[in-house]
Amino acid sequence: MSPLLIAGLGLLMVATAFLSGLFGMAGGLILIGVLLTILPLPSAMVLHAITQMASNGWRAFLWRSHIRWRPVAIYLIGCALALGAWSITRYVPDKPIALLLLGVTPFMARLTPRNLKPNPDSIWQGSFYGFICMGLMLMTGVSGPLMDTFFLGGNFGRREVVATKAACQVASHFVKLVYFGGIIDQAATLDPVLAIIAVAASMTGTTLARRFLEAMTDLQFRTWAGRLITTVACYYIIYGSWLLLARSNAFAF
């Protein structure tokens, strides 16, 4: 990568880490979409995993007193089951399909019947969501929209949502790193300079967001988080559809 591109990615990582630090979501969704356009899918997943581990790890540390550890432990059960299943199939979607999945997921999550209110403390629900979220992450790079629905449905304040989800995401992105960097493509390379910049940028953006999150109310948090996710999801549906259409036209000729 050119120095200019690395600098641009660094600024993007600060901005997306800020969004994730503020809402506990959306930043990773935006970042993976950009990385998928400029890098091969395995390399994009490896870089995204390192960036998000730094961002979520630092966020979990900053809000460590608000982490609900029982839901985290239950979620990890589902993650382990998903890694085992995907290690057997080794399914990796191409970029248009991955982008479409990124866009459709938030709307699928919102179709969950209202009477099935998520309970993050439930062993069965937590394991199920952990399995589905981890499977989705191994296909698209993120699972935030579905995980957001799970934690927002529980009796969590905004700080608990951000902190508990961050702890879960550290483990999820580590599993993704192992999957794409060790199982799918052991030759996937990453510029060490870019990796260092990614970690520093993620920690910077996360730190900057803390004061803004403190100033928000729970209602503002939930309202703006929903609007942001919807906007980004619509963009990925349009972009993924355009790539599929362009590829179909190319085959036609």
Image: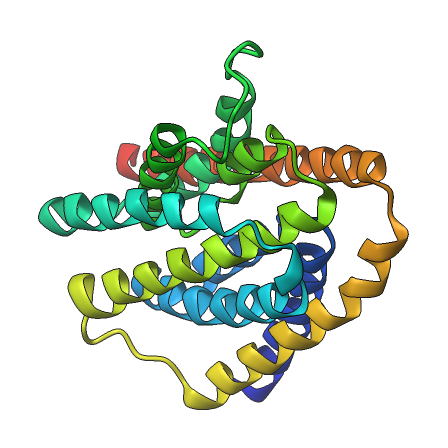
Give 5 or 67, whichever is nearer the viewer.
67
Quadrant of image for the C terminus: top left
Above or below for 204 versus 92 = below
Residue 84, x across and y down, in percent: 16, 49
* Residue beneath the point at 78% across and 64% down: 210
- Residue 185 visible in the current orientation: yes
Residue 174, x across and y down, in percent: 36, 64
Give 16 or 223, whichever is nearer the viewer.
223
Which residue is outermost to the left?
A: 88
* Residue beneath the point at 60% across and 71% down: 58
Above or below for 111 versus 148 = above
Q: Quadrant of residue 166?
A: bottom right
Q: How is the image coloured?
A: rainbow
- Residue 40 visible in the current orientation: no
Q: Tell me: 228 left or right of 43.
A: right
* Residue beneath the point at 52% across and 44% down: 144
Residue 111, x across and y down, in percent: 52, 16
* Residue beneath the point at 53% across and 33% down: 150
